[in-house]
Image (cartoon, grey):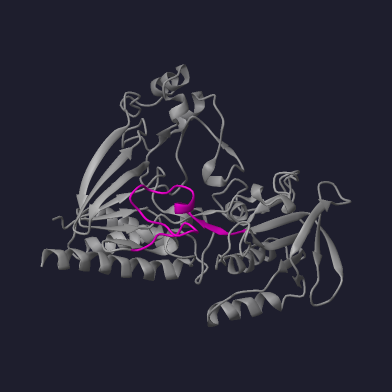
Amino acid sequence: MSDSILVIGGGFSGLTAAVEAAEMGYDVYIVEKEPYLGGRVAQLNKYFPKMCPPTCGLEINFKRIKTNPRITFYSQSSVESVTGSAGDFSVRLKVNPRYTTPQATNCKAGIDVSTSEFPNEFNFGLDTRKGIFMPHPMSFPNQCVVDSRVAGTDEGRKIQEAMPEGHVDLSQTVETVDLNVGSIIVATGWKPYDASKLDRLAFGKFPNIVTNMMVERMASPSGPTEGKIVRQSDKTEPKTVGFVQCAGSRDKDHLPFCSYICCNATLKQILYLREQNPDTEIYVFYIDIRSPGRKYENFYAKVKSDPKVHFIKGKVAEVKPGSGADNVILVAEDTIGGGKIEQEVELAVLATGMQPTGAIEPIAGIEYDSDGFVVPKEGVIPCGCAKRPIDVVSSAQSATAAALKAVQTIVRRAG
């Protein structure tokens, strides 16, 4: 029997669950597939309900992790398999090399000699990064990464020579780690639904159609456009913006469920645009606006009162080229006003849904439902968006509950 706990996923939910369990006196292992902890929240400009940047929530948890010897985390790692039962799970991890050492906290010397350019995953391909990189400015751990595609090349050797001695280690290899744990918290989070699958919305066919998460990165002061939401074709600020709600959600051919956060994300991003340019005209095409709870409903009322924000109840059925340079026309049926509406905008934002990571990257030994959410069983406790679509605040509550259930499993088995 084991009295340790495994947390799969190092995003906001996973970190919260881990520190709560560790502070109750249990050894905790965190496994995160990215080279940094913080998950999807780290990519946001601001989050509800306080409209604060990611640092105001993540830094507290990072500090709790750094000061708690009961927590061990594996970044850039994945769970290969889970076997056994509550109280006695055997878990195999795959730990990928970073090709750097912990003292590599500044990549500049390596970047200066790196010739490769890769799409920057953290910024959803809005810019590029080099063969050695820091995942993002507030990355934890604060350690550079050498891309595996250059590690074994002449470029990799040039990076190693340019960096301070001992900072780059190209001899690192993939490692396998076997753990024995008493309970497992699954906090694998979500991914934005692949907008290229939404043929009628023409993502990828017109340069000025972006997703809501791309807007978050543009709006961030540390993002690729230093806080400015711009058109991709000419990097100018748009004077007209159209938001397309439920892009992939509530659709039997894509995500059949409501993704919960999309309406509030759009309301938030409207505020970003209003702060940037109070003269921008904004059009929101929606099925219905879902803003549950008094705070969110009040927020919706505030945005709706803006005379330059126009809500159109109608699902966008088609996207056509506009009359202006790289503009697009959003075509929908106005179910309240009546008739077909064609609205030309300089920038279109797709409010893409939340797809649970389990639907894309399932873990052997973990059970999922038809949508990819984790099915709980004794000793395996899902939380956050691995359980259902929820916001950051609800994710923290879900994570705390998961930590308590994980401890209860161990206590029952020990008894």
Q: Residue at x 35, y 33 (%)?
A: 97
Does the magenta run of residues contain 20? no
Q: Quadrant of the C terminus?
A: bottom left
Left or right, 106 with reference to 103 = right
Q: Residue at x 75, y 62 (%)?
A: 316
Q: Quadrant of the N terminus?
A: bottom left
Total numbered labels placed on residues in the image: 0
Residue 129, image x, y percentages: 54, 35
Left or right, 312 with reference to 68 = right
Q: In which quarter of the view is residue 398 placed?
A: bottom left
Query: What's the magenta bit mostly, secondary-structure-wise?
Result: loop
Q: Residue at x 38, y 62 (%)?
A: 375
Asked whether residue 240 is in view, the answer is no
Q: Nearer the viewer, residue 316 or 257?
A: 257
Residue 85, image x, y percentages: 23, 56
Residue extent of the magenta highlight: 352-376
Asked whether residue 156 is in view, the answer is yes
Does the magenta run of residues contain 364? yes
Q: Nearer the viewer, residue 174 or 310?
A: 174
Q: Residue at x 75, y 69 (%)?
A: 314
Residue 140, image x, y percentages: 37, 48
